[in-house]
Image: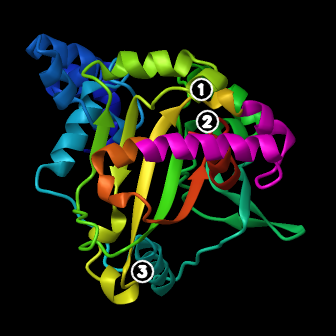
Amino acid sequence: MPTKLIQILRKLNLFNKIFSYYNFCEVSLKEVVESLTDDKDLQAILYYNYGDYGTPPANAPFSMHSLLQQHFMLGAYYPVGGPSNIAYHLVQTIRKAGGDVLVRAKCTEILTSTDQSKAIGVCVHKGSESFNILAPIVISNAGLHNTFNSLLSTSVKEKYLLNDICSRFNPGMSCLTAFIGLKGSNEDLSLTATNVWYQMSNNTQQDLDNFCKLSMEEALEVDFPILFISFPSTKDPAWSAHYPGKSVCEIVSPVPYRWFEDWGEEYSEGKKGDHYLTLKKTFSERMWCQVLKLYPQLKDKVDYFELGTPLTNRFYLEYSKGE
């Protein structure tokens, strides 16, 4: 659609009248599902996988969930050789087109023209030096808060009222993510290529809200209200050839960032002390105990277990609240 036509439709407030999609952007997933049925079990089934985009049903626009469900209607795909092959082939394509890809080169600023009317490049920090890389188009996938709050100058934010925009949006949910190596092949352990959302009841949002209100000490004594469980090794047709007799599991559970924020300011990853490591161990054990209720055949099969916290996300992905 031409830009000028979009501008006219927006000015006349006609988008919602012409495109029904925009009406569903303004109503929550919870509202739509509850208008369709009073059956709590069915409601839970209809929005069970909201964790894929990290926003509970009461806060998620129905349009977002609709797009997710449409995405899965015909099944899903997994890259042969694992997710690293996505980056590998993308890099080759970019370089063939005359571009390049930088790693361990932190982007510190989006450069703008003198009149601040457009982005003209980025500043990256590599080693002890900084470099300005100019470009006709700048695309940021660092997220709204990182892009507006961290990568643009104060004068640009003030000119375009970006602080006002950011204040209307809270960061997404943070999470614990477990990476587990298992002794035994997919076949030996009877693992299948499916994703599982394990929920404690049909009132998943209330369960999650109650869980997130707990202190960390209280949370260490209860089960996680929701777990995402997946076995990536079952999805890769090349896995068994590369890693015979082994398989892997991934587990994700939403948690509030406030449980970990005291460490986030004072320590870098790997230097948080014994108390932090003890908490990770306790969360890991509780998480794995819940998984064994669904997959008892995995008992005593763990060869490797590493738990990432919201601070891990903050350290590696630069998301301020570990989302």
Where does the image place residue 49, in percent across and percent down from the top left?
Answer: 28, 37
Indicate the amino acid at tag 3. Answer: His
Task: Tell which of 234 and 87 is nearer to you.
Answer: 234
The Cα–Cα distance between marks 3 and 1, rounded to whole angstroms, is: 34 Å
Residue at image point 24% right, 22% down: 202
- Determine the secondary structure under disc 3: helix
Name the residue beneath numbered marker 3: 89
Q: Which mark is residue 127?
A: none
Where does the image place residue 169, in percent across and percent down from the top left?
Answer: 53, 24
Name the residue beneath numbered marker 1: 166
Residue at image point 64% right, 20% down: 215
Range of magenta residues = 261-289
Indicate the amino acid at tag 1. Answer: Cys
Quadrant hosting residue 241 = bottom left
The Cα–Cα distance between marks 3 and 2, rounded to whole angstroms, is: 29 Å
Q: Are marks 2 and 1 in contact (CB under 8 Å)?
A: yes
Is 258 on the left or on the right of 84, as rendered?
Answer: right
Indicate the amino acid at tag 2. Answer: His
Q: Tell how many labels.
A: 3
Tell me the quarter of the image containing the C terminus.
Answer: top right
Quadrant hosting residue 163 = top right
- Determine the secondary structure under disc 1: helix
Q: Which mark is residue 145?
A: 2
In this view, 138 is above or below 275: below
Task: Tell which of 244 and 164 is nearer to you.
Answer: 244
